[in-house]
Amino acid sequence: MTAAITSPRLDVRRADDRFKTNVGWLDSKHSFSFSNHYDPANTHHGVLMVNNDDIVVPGQGFDTHPHQDMEIVTWVLQGSLVHQDSMGHSGVIYPGLAQRMSAGTGILHSEKNDSWRLQGDADEHRDPVHFIQMWVVPDEAGITPGYEQLEIDHELLTGGLVPVASGMPGHADHSAIRIKNKYAAMHVARLQPGQAPITLPDSPFLHVFVARGEASLEGVGLLAEGDAVRIGGGGGQQLTTDTGAEIIVWEMHAKIAG
């Protein structure tokens, strides 16, 4: 008798197939069910519940609103985003700066594109902000709310997968912001044309998202900007690019029950 050999499951989700919200000041694309968009077959992958690809015009943004029992990671691709919350935290998030907010027992916050205030009134400074916001469930409910941000731009110059946000014990020595989920880690790679391939972590659940550019994934082929692949049953696949790409990879060793 021989053991059955199973291959990882590769579920490709194309950019144009995402849920979409466009209300003038906000152009948002949702990889999972979000707000008024609900599909019972598309609520999460592993412990990742939200992967929103947002563009906000200058002078606009999300007014003060509540969150509870969620780990929220924001990654800016272009422009700058101003954060303020009810715990007294405030800051400007920009490319290369990772931000984490633990909603815990409850927190209020706002997120605005204040580029016109930060840089002046000239038209050339009225830039949109483009960012990815991701939500993962915490290990336990009812924790104390918290906030952390960390400059990680220098580490990304290597071109490899860099832990950016993690709750996994194995990443304790890395320069990563901490999330309250010991089974999950977010990695980012800024791939350069012609560089050696990067290898995805060996994990039962992976979410690979092309934030910018194009990349090729072993077993899938070409992935365009906004495309994602949900991998179940093991990693180890290689990623390459001919044009340059910024890739966000969630490594997850647990899934939401149900």
Image (cartoon, grey):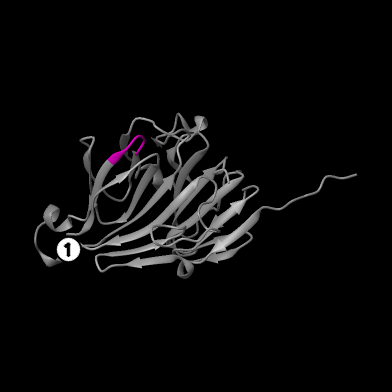
Query: Badge 1 is on which residue?
Result: 126
- Which portion, as a residue range, is magenta? 103-107
> How many numbered marks are there?
1
* Image quadrant containing the N terminus: top right
Q: In this view, does 54 lie to the left or right of 241?
A: left
Please report the residue visible at 13 percent of the width from the left and 55 percent of the height from the top: 119
Disc 1 marks a residue whose amino acid type is Arg
Please report the residue visible at 45 percent of the width from the left and 29 percent of the height from the top: 173
Residue 253: within the magenta?
no
Camera sees residue 176 = no
Q: Which of 171/48 is in front?
A: 48
Q: Position of residue 160 (x, y in %)?
A: 48, 47
Q: Is residue 236 left or right of residue 129?
A: right
Camera sees residue 50 = yes
Q: Is residue 10 left or right of residue 49?
A: right
Q: Where is residue 190 in the image (x, y as percent from the top left)?
A: 43, 53
In the image, residue 146 sits, relative to residue 205, either above or below, namely above
The kind of secondary structure the magenta stretch mainly shows is: loop
Please report the residue visible at 43 percent of the width from the left and 54 percent of the height from the top: 51
Of all residues, the one furthest to the right in this rendering is: 1
Q: Position of residue 82 (x, y in %)?
A: 22, 49
Q: Where is residue 63 in the image (x, y as percent from the top left)?
A: 22, 52
